[in-house]
Image (cartoon, helix red, strand yellow):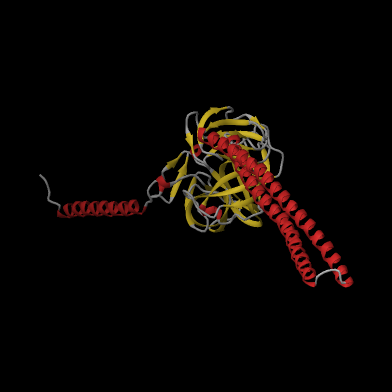
Amino acid sequence: MDIARPDLAKKRAWRRISWAALALVSIAVVSWAVSRLQPAAPAVDRAAVWVDTVKRGPMVRQVRGLGTLVPEDILFIPALSEGRVAQVVNRPGVTVTRDTVVLVLTNPELEVQAQDAEWKVREAEARMRNLHVQLESDRLDKEARLAQVQSEYVQAKLKSERDDKLLAEGLAVELDVKLARATRDELAKRFELEQRRLEIGKDSVEAQLSAQQVLIEQQKAALELAREKVRRLVVRAGAYGVLQAVNVEPGQQVSMGTSLAKVAQPEKLKAQIRIAETQAKDVLLGQKAIIDTRNGTVDGVVSRIDPAVVEGTVTVDIRLVGALPAGARPDLSVDGTVELERLDDVVFVGRPAFGQPRTTVGLFRLEADGQHAGRVPVQLGRSSVNTIEVEQGLQPGDTVILSDMSQWDAYDRVRLR
């Protein structure tokens, strides 16, 4: 028969309670430990990121821009006369000289005006010849009158002298002597007046001829201007170079001053590059530059900085000081790099994907195991094309990820696989 043992039942009960309490404590400890664990770092493909090592030493600050080669001297050929384009003789790309005909205009009105001006010159010259004849005739009349008065005066003078002698001998009447003297004095005055009239007539002849000559010169100047307008209908290059553009087509009506064509000298080129407005503030006149034509490089110097900002960029002119590479020509696309300054001893690293000068960014720095990278705040300083100064947050020898890591913004640590 079974014997009741109350002490064993109590032991079993305590054992069950102990195991249950231990299980609860274990569960609590495990839960607490799990809650303290950090989430697993996301994996990043090592080949897909760009890393660089922080260095200390000299750093050259540069800015880069895209642009084109343009001629230093461009001659725009304007329409000097109104007309209609009759013929385009040469097209862009042709080498031209000063007298090379680019295009021909027509304007019948200018030809009619030139013909009218020519007839006016002939008319003025005919009037000049007629005036010569009239003035010569008047001069001869004055000289004839002067000769007649002179003759009468000489006769009156001789008669007066004769009568004076006869009066002295008592052979003449005193009244006749006085009349002879009066006639002599009157003719003397007339002779003097005729002489003055002839002198004045000479001055008048010169004045009238000069006035008519001025009129002829005016008519000739008008004729030359009309002929020049007709000659300008044949449009010439006006300088040595290469014809860059012809802005009109046959049959097109153009007014005076319209830009017809463009001539440039291909040997004298400069580079015009466009630099971001945030970087252009450090560009100064005289700074060195290098222009890459993709077929060679050429040195240059900053010669002009456009004061205006267009679409977020500033245009900078680079004067080329070296020999042009083969194939360099106007409108060729180029890359330009301007050297801003040289920093002797700074901490720098490759420029991050979103690292702007004078800002603080979060960069992933590789840890000692080389398998993980943790985010650290980095204060950036002055920048260049491919490098940027590190002011705080990194030390020489640190390796950081420079690629765009925005998709891992929610993590402070990543694993490289």
Compared to residue 332, the image places residue 385 above or below, namely: below
The tally of labels here is 0
Q: In the image, residue 303 lies at what x, y percent?
A: 64, 51
Seen from this angle, which residue lies furthest right?
169
* Residue nearer the viewer, 220 or 260: 220
x and y, in percent, of residue 415 in the image:
46, 44
Based on the displayed image, in which of its 4 quarters is residue 166 positioned? Answer: bottom right
Q: Where is residue 68 drawn, in percent x and y?
A: 58, 40
Q: Where is residue 228 in the image (x, y as percent from the top left)?
A: 61, 38
Q: Is residue 40 above or below residue 28?
A: above
Q: Quadrant location of residue 264? A: top right
* Residue 72 shows in the view: no
345 is higher (above) or lower (below) than 266: below
Quadrant location of the N terminus? top left
* Residue 45 visible in the picture: yes
Task: State the residue in front, 298 or 373.
Answer: 298
The residue that appears at 62% across and 29% down in the rendered structure is: 94
Say if 10 sits above or below 80 in the image. Answer: below
Q: Is residue 330 left or right of residue 311?
A: right
Residue closest to the far front: 171
Instruction: Out of 328 and 50, give the one closest to the viewer.
Output: 328
Seen from the viewer's position, the closer of residues 89 and 2 is 89
